[in-house]
Amino acid sequence: MRPPASDVLRGTLDLLILRTLALEPMHGWGIAQRIQQTSRGVLDVNQGSLYPALQRLELRGAIDAEWRTSDHNRRARYYRLTAAGRRALGAETENWRRYVSAVNWILEGA
Amino acid sequence: MSAVLRALRIRLRALLRPQVARRELDEEMRLHLELETEANRRRGMDPAEARRQAAVTFGGLDMAKEAHRDALGIRWIEDTITDARFALRTVAKNPVLSGAAMLTIALGIGANTAIFSVVNAVILRPLPFPHADQLVMLSEDNPEKGWRRQTAAPANYLDWKERVHAFADVAAYEPGGGATMTGEGEPQRISLRGVTGNYFTVLGVRPALGRVFTSQETWQSGAPVAVISDRMWRDVFGAAATTVGKSVAINGTRTAIVGVLPASFSYAADTVDVWRPVAWDPQNRGQVFFRRAHWLRVIARLQAGVTPRAADAEFQTVVRQLQTEYTETNRFMGADLVPLHEFLIGDVRTPLLLLQVAVGLLLLIACANVGNILLVQAVGREREASLRLTLGAGRGRLVRQALTESLVLSALGGIAGVTLGWWGTRLFAALQPNGMLPVANVPLDVRVLVAMVVLTTATGLLFGIAPALWSARRLPAEVLREGERGTSRRVRRWGDMLVVGELAFALMLTVGAGLLLQSVRRLEQVDPGVDARGVLAVGISLPSGYDSTPQQISFFDALRENVRALPGVTDAGLALVPPFGGVGYTSDFHIAGRPANEYGTEIAHDYVTPGYFSTLRIPLLAGRLLTPADRAGAVPVVVINQALARKYFPGEDPVGQRITFDKVPDSTSVWRTIVGVVGDVRQQGLAVEPLIEAYEAFAQNGNSYMTLLVRTGGSGDVRALVPAIRNVVARLDPTLALAQVQSLEHMERRSIASQRFIMLLLVVFAAAGFVLAMVGVYAVMAQLGRRRTREMGIRIALGARMGELQWLVVRHGLRLVVAGLTIGAAGALAATRAIRALLYQVSPGDPPTFLAVLVLLALTALAASWLPAARASRADPAMALRAE
C-alpha cells in the first residue's frame, strides 16, 4: 500500500494543472501522475475532478487540447498551455504565494 | 481565436454533435483507466487486481462524466432537449388526452389570433400614411343642434386653414358621392369623391402614374381633372400606361385623367374609384351658404413637433374668433380636433375590445381545462415522481420537466391555433358587414406573431404550474405510504379552484353574449315605420343636361309612370333619400305665429313624389298625402312626421299651419303649408330614433339624384324586376346607368348588420367557453367520483342508500357552482358596464338576462356533476374495495 494521499485542495487544482502543463503537453493520466510524483505522493488528483477542471480551463482558453499519438502508439488527448494560460499561471502562482505566506503568518503569529 | 469564440465553439460542438463529444470523453477516460491499470501492474499487481485498483482510484466513471458535462455549462440546454423529447413521448403515449388538451389550446389561441389580428390591424397599426401621427380630423360640434363631430362648412374650413399656425396644411373631402361615368366601355356607376387640391399632399400620398392635384385646383381653374384608383386603372383601363391623358365623361362632364394612385393607397377602407377637385367658385367664399351648409370632412397635418393638444388650443381660439365674427351662422358652432386614427376607428373600438376580452376569457377557460387534464396526469404519475425524488432527482428538475411538458403541449396547440386563427381572421374580414373595419387588409404581422408566441408561452406556464408544483411538492415517503388516498384532498382543492374559475369566466362570457343577443332581438323588433318586404330601391343620377328643375321633374315623373305600368309592380314612388339611407339634410325651422325665439333646429328633410308613402305603406295619420297637384307654382306644401307633430304641436292640429326652414324668417322665406301627418320612419337605420322630419314635394324642389322605390306584387326576389327597370331607364335615356340597386329589406337588415355580427361572434365564443367549462366541471367531478369509489363501496356495503351518496357528490358540486356563479355574476356586473354603448334598450345589468344565464349555467353544471356522482354510487361494493 502506498501512504495515504490528500485530495488536492479545491481551487488549487487549476493552478497545479497549469504548472504541470508548463513543462510539456500531456494527457489526463500523465497530468495526474505528474502531480502525484512531483508532490512526492502527497497529493492525489481525483479523476472525478480532473476532467471537469481540464474542461473548465479549456473553456477559459488557458489550455488547448488535441488528439495525438502517444509514445506507446496510443491515441490520447493532449493538453497544452496557451499564451493566456501562461499569463494565468504567473498571476495565480503569485496569488498562491501571497495566500500561503498570509496563512503562515497567522499560524506562526498565533 | 478569442477565448469567447473558443468557448462557444466547444459548447456548440458538444450540443450539435453530442455523440462525437461523448465518444471522445469515453475514449479519454478509457485510456486513463488503461494507463492506470498498466502502472498498477508495473507495481506488481496481478491483472485483475490492477484493473480493480485503477477503477477504485478513478472513482465513479459516470459521475466523472456527469461532472465533466456540468463543467461545460450546457447542462440546462441538454436537459431541456431531453425534457422536450420526454414530453413529446408522453404526448404521443396519451393521444386522446393530449389531443383534447391541444385542441382546447388551439381553440383558445386560434380565437385570440383572429381577434388580435383584427385589433392589431385596426387599433394598433398606424394609418398607412407617412407620419400618420401628425394627421388630425377637424369636425364641428353644435350643442344647440346636438351635433357631435359633424362635417364642417367650407368657409370655416378655409378660415381654419389660414389662421391656425399649428397646422402645416389642411385638406378636406366630401364624404360619399357617386356619378355615372361614360366614354370608356359601358356607362357605369362609380364612386366619386370631391377633394381639395392639397388632399393627397396632406396625406403624403404620391401617385403611381401622372400627378395628383395642386392647391390651385381647389378653386375652379381650367378643364376638369380627375385621379383614379389602382383598381379602376386595372379593371377599366387594362392597366394601360396611356391612361393618363385620356378623358372620360363624369355625369356628362368631360374630365381628363391626370393621375393613378398606388395600389397601396387606402383611406379607411373606402372604395373610391375617382377623385376630383371640389373646384369651388371663388365667389362662394363670401356667401352665407358657404358657412351655413356643412358637408366637408377636414384633415389637418400638424407642424412637425406640435402636439395635438397644443394644436387644439390654438384651434379653439380661432373657432371662438369665428363665433363672434359670424354670429348668424357660427354663434353656437364649436369644433373638435382628434387624431385621425382615433376618429376613423371610433365606432369599432369598443366592439373589438369586447371581443378581445371575450377570447381572453375563452383562453382562460381553456387553460383551466388543460390544467386539469395535466393535473390528473401528474397525480397518475405521482409514484414515478416520488421514486425519482428518492433516487436523488432534484425537485427543480422535476418542476422543470413538468413545465417543459406543458410548454410542449401549448406550443403544439399554439401552432395549430395560430393556423386556425389566421383562417379565422380571413373569415372575419370576409364576413364583416361592409365597411365595418376601417382598414383595407388584416395582415398577420410580426406583432401578431410575437403576441401569440408570448400568449402561448404564458398559457403553457399558466396551465402547467399547478401540476408542476404538485409533482415536486410532495414528500416521497408520504406518497409511497398513503398511496392514492392521501392525494385526493389536495388534488380536489386544485380541481375545485379550476371549476370555480371556469364557471365564473363562462358566466361573464355568456352574460355578455346574452346582453348583445337581447339588444339585437329588440332591434329586430323595432318598427321601422315602413313595410320593406317586396320593395326594391334603385338609385338614379341624372347627368349634366338635366340641370333645370323642370327637366328633372319631367324625367322622374315619366320614370315613375313607366315603372308603375310594368307587370308585377303594384306601386312606385321616389325619394331624395330612402328609408335606412340616412338623412338628406337638416335645417332650422320656424312655425308661423310663434314668438321669434321659439324656433326649432335639426329638422330632417326629404323630397318625395306622390306614391312614396303608399309604396312603403307609411300610414297617414292626419290630413292628406302629396298629390300630383302639388307642383311648382302651386302652394308650397309639406307633410310632417308624427315626431314633429308631437313635439311642436302638442294638443293642436298641425294640418293647415305654416312652416319655414329659416331660424329667423324674413321676406325671402318660403312658407309651406302643412297638409298631412305621417308615421315615423327609422330613416337612419333600426338602431337610431327617428328625427323630426318634413317631406316636401319633389315637384316643388327638384334634384338630380333620386331613389326609385318599387313595390312588387309577388313574393319572389324583388331584384327580378331590375332588367325591366333598366329597360325603362334606357328607353328614357340610353346614357343613364342604374346606381345602387338593392332590396329595401336588405337595407333594413344591413342597418343593424354590424351589431348582429358582433353579437354572433360573441355568442360563438360564449358557446365555446360554455361547453369547455361544462366539460371541465364534468371532468373534475368525475375524478372526484372515481376517487371516492372506495368510500362509496364501503358506505353501500354498510347500507347507505344510493340517493344519499349521490347527494354527497352533488352537494360538493353545488357548493362550487354557487361559488363560481357568484364570483362570475359580480365580475359580469362590473364588466358589462363597459359595453353600455353597444346595448340597445337593454341595461348592462339586465335582470332577465342575468337570471336566464345563471339558471342555464347552474342547471348544466349540476347535471355535469350529477352524472359522475350517479356513476360512482352505482359502484359494486366488492369491486370498489378491490380497486386499491
Image: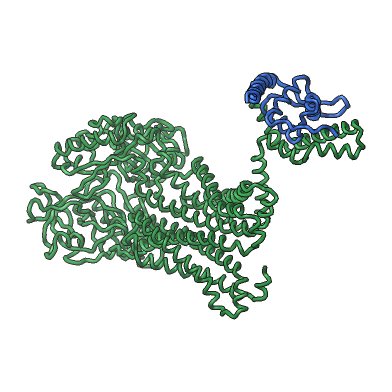
Residue at 76 percent of width and 29 percent of height = A43
How far from the left and from the top, in percent, is residue B469?
A: 58, 52
Taking the image as shown, residue B566 lies to the left or right of residue B293, namely right
Residue B194 at least partly seen? no
Q: Quadrant of the N terminus of chain B?
A: top right
The total of numbered circles placed on residues is 0
Q: Looking at the rendering, which quadrant does residue B833 occupy?
A: bottom left
Position of residue A32 relative to residue B127, above or below, is above
Position of residue A31 relative to residue B55, above or below, is above
Residue at 40 percent of width and 68 percent of height = B852
Of A27 and B172, which appears nearest the observer?
Answer: A27
- Palette colour of chain B: green
Q: Looking at the rendering, which quadrant does residue B242 occupy?
A: top left
Of B122 and B223, which appears nearest the observer?
Answer: B122
How far from the left and from the top, in percent, is residue B277?
A: 31, 36
Taking the image as shown, residue B248 lies to the left or right of residue B461, namely left
Q: Quadrant of the C terminus of chain B?
A: bottom right
Residue at 71 percent of width and 37 percent of height = B67
Of B729 and B381, which appears nearest the observer?
Answer: B381
Residue at 67 percent of width and 49 percent of height = B86
- Palette colour of chain A: blue
